[in-house]
Amino acid sequence: MRTIQMKLNDEPVEALIQENRSMLDFLRNNMGLTGTKKGCEEGECGACTILLNGKPVNSCLMLAVEADGQEITTIEGIKKNSDLHPVQKAFIEKWALQCGFCTPGMIMSAIVLLEENPNPTEYEIRDAIAGNLCRCTGYSKIVEAISAAAEVLREV
């Protein structure tokens, strides 16, 4: 067991955890943050994407002890006050989700893209979400939603 400290969704957290516990399991089971989805557990599907110091990572491939002293953001941490993030709003407005399993990971990847590139092309959007698999939508609506969110964020 090891004690770690981190900033999780803008809040300080201290936890005693097993050294071999994945970040995904820590978030879901220890912290009750179930928005991060457990998919393949091999880093292939992107359903578990979180932000580590502002960069997307597959939480299933990360040990929770690696978060010691770091800043972690999950899907639960992206809304401000009670307002959904513009990417979340765009996914709803553009019907960019069906079963919703891939949606948190897609949104986290999209947020990073739009922070780094506020005016992405369709190709750049598709490239940014290439590590996130969706079995329902065929990606067209997802790309449309990310593009719409980019427009909204540029106006802010």
Image (cartoon, rainbow, N blue to C red):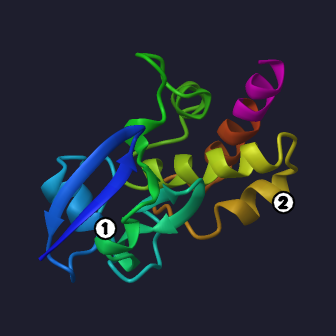
- Find residue 155 and report its image quarter: top right
Instruction: Please give the count of numbered marks on the rendered protein.
Output: 2
Q: Earlier in the sequence, mark 2 or mark 1?
A: 1
> Residue 120's x, y, as percent?
85, 48
Q: Is 154 colored magenta in this rendering?
A: yes
**Residue 41 drawn above or below residue 64:** below
Residue 100 in view (yes/no): no
Element on which disc 2 rests: helix
Q: Residues within 10 Å of mark 2 (few under 14, many from 20)?
A: few
- Find residue 94 and report its image quarter: top right
Which residue is disc 1 drawn over? Answer: 23
Q: Nearer the viewer, mark 2 or mark 1?
A: 1
Residue beneath the point at 73% across and 31% down = 148
Q: Is 59 colored magenta in this rendering?
A: no
Q: Is residue 147 left or right of residue 52?
A: right
Which residue is disc 2 drawn over? Answer: 123
In the rendered view of the protein, which quadrant contains the N terminus? Answer: bottom left
Query: Which residues make up the magenta segment?
Result: 149-156
Residue beneath the point at 31% across and 67% down = 23
Element on which disc 1 rests: helix
Q: Is residue 155 left or right of residue 56?
A: right
Q: Residues within 10 Å of mark 1 (few under 14, many from 20)?
A: many
> Residue 46's x, y, as percent?
47, 67
Residue beneath the point at 29% across and 65% down = 24
Three-letter residue code for mark 2 = Tyr
> Residue 92's x, y, as percent?
51, 29
In the rendered view of the protein, which quadrant contains the C terminus? Answer: top right
Three-letter residue code for mark 1 = Met
Q: 103 or 155: nearer the eye?
A: 155
* Mark drawn on residue 119: none
